[in-house]
Image (tube, rainbow, N blue to C red):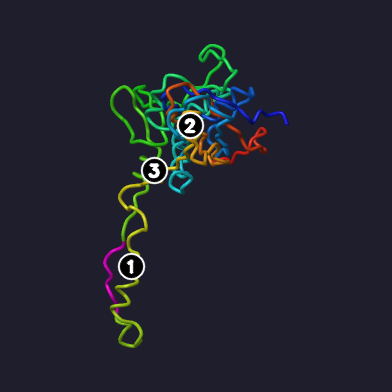
């Protein structure tokens, strides 16, 4: 095995921190791990977290859902980014480590740092780069991509929301009201009531036809300090979970820095299990 699959990140006290697993793997293993993959990773509390944790809940881990529209939206966003740069891609040499990267949401976009694994030090923009994709319109205004949240197309911080834009291009429609027919004159078991039943029962989809929605996918990790009575259970690991684009949102609800252990499933993509999206 030539890939480090067990990595630790330090989360600031009382914080919500966004993780980019592809960036974390790249920094730790000195190889480019592309973001547009479905990674499998486990998030774990490693041992006791110290005295007086204060509350049961330590980490709340959110990842993108693997629902069909979410996967399609992520794929469409990458396709649109590549399409917008196609004239330039055909004309110049693309940077060796160029990769399509998007943010989890607009709050992630505002995070002032890229979370690195413990033990790794890099000067971004000088000796290394973990840049998120920008595309430019005809007057040179930049746009980035987020998986969630609506698009922002005015002002200084412009962005395309992948799910939002996919919803706008994939709205569903309903069928027209049934017109009926004359077959019930010759077939006794065919009648207007049956026509109405089969044409109206199911003329709307089994999901919100006007607003594209995806489920929340959240995992809570618990541990107990000495000041918290042990009620007989703890949740120290999520187990292996699917992480589209490697994007993770983690809330540390403790008023102190804490370490979160990330363990990746081994596989054939540079030592990591990852499915191309």
Q: Is the residue marked by circle 3 packed among few (<14), some (14-19), or many (20+) residues within 10 Å?
A: some
The answer for how far apart the CA atoms under marks 1 and 3 are is: 27 Å
Q: Is residue 104 found left or right of 202 in the rendered image?
A: right
Residue nearest the observer in this picture, 69 or 215: 215
At a point 35% along the width and 47% down the height, the residue shown is: 212
Disc on res. 86: 2
Dot 3 falls on a residue whose secondary structure is helix
Q: Label 3, on which residue?
A: 166
**Badge 2: how crowded within 10 Å, few (<14), some, or many (20+)?**
few
Q: Which residue in the rendered view is the most extreme toward the right?
A: 1
The question of residue 177 being in magenta is answered with yes
Instruction: Please name whichever residue, 248 or 179, is drawn nearer the observer in this view of the structure.
Output: 248
> Which residue is nearer to you in this view: 146 or 63?
63
Crowding around mark 1 (Cα neighbors within 10 Å: few <14, some 14 to 19, many 20+) is: few
Predominant SS of the magenta segment? loop
Q: Which of the two labelled residues, at mark 1 and mark 2, occupies the earlier sequence position?
A: 2
Nearer the N terminus, badge 3 or badge 2?
2
Determine the secondary structure under disc 2: helix
Mark found first going from the N terminus, 1 or 3: 3
Q: Which mark is residue 201?
A: 1
1 and 3 marks in contact (CB < 8 Å): no
First to last magenta residue range: 175-181
């Amino acid at each position: 095995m030539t890939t480090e699959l067990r990595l630790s990140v330090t989360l600031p006290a009382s914080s919500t921190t966004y993780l980019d697993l592809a960036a974390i793997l790249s920094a730790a293993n000195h190889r480019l791990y592309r973001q547009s993959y479905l990674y499998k990773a486990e998030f774990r509390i490693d041992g006791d977290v110290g005295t007086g944790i204060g509350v049961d809940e330590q980490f709340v881990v959110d990842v993108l859902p693997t629902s069909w529209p979410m996967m399609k939206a992520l794929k469409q966003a990458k396709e649109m980014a590549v399409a917008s740069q196609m004239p330039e891609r055909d004309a110049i040499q693309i940077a060796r480590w160029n990769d399509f990267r998007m943010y989890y949401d607009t709050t992630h976009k505002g995070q002032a740092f890229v979370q690195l694994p413990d033990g790794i030090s890099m000067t971004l923009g000088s000796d290394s780069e973990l840049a998120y994709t920008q595309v430019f319109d005809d007057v040179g205004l930049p746009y980035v991509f987020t998986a969630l949240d609506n698009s922002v197309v005015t002002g200084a911080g412009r962005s395309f929301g992948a799910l939002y834009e996919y919803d706008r291009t994939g709205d569903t429609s309903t069928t027209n009201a049934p017109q009926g027919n004359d077959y019930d004159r010759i077939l006794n078991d065919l009648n207007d009531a049956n026509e109405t039943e089969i044409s109206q029962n199911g003329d709307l989809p089994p999901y919100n036809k006007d607003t594209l929605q995806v489920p929340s996918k959240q995992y809570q990790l618990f541990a107990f300090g000495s000041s918290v009575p042990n009620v007989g259970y703890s949740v120290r690991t999520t187990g292996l979970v699917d992480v589209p684009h490697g994007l993770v949102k983690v809330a540390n609800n403790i008023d102190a820095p804490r370490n979160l252990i990330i363990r990746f499933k081994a596989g054939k993509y540079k030592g990591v299990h990852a499915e191309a999206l």
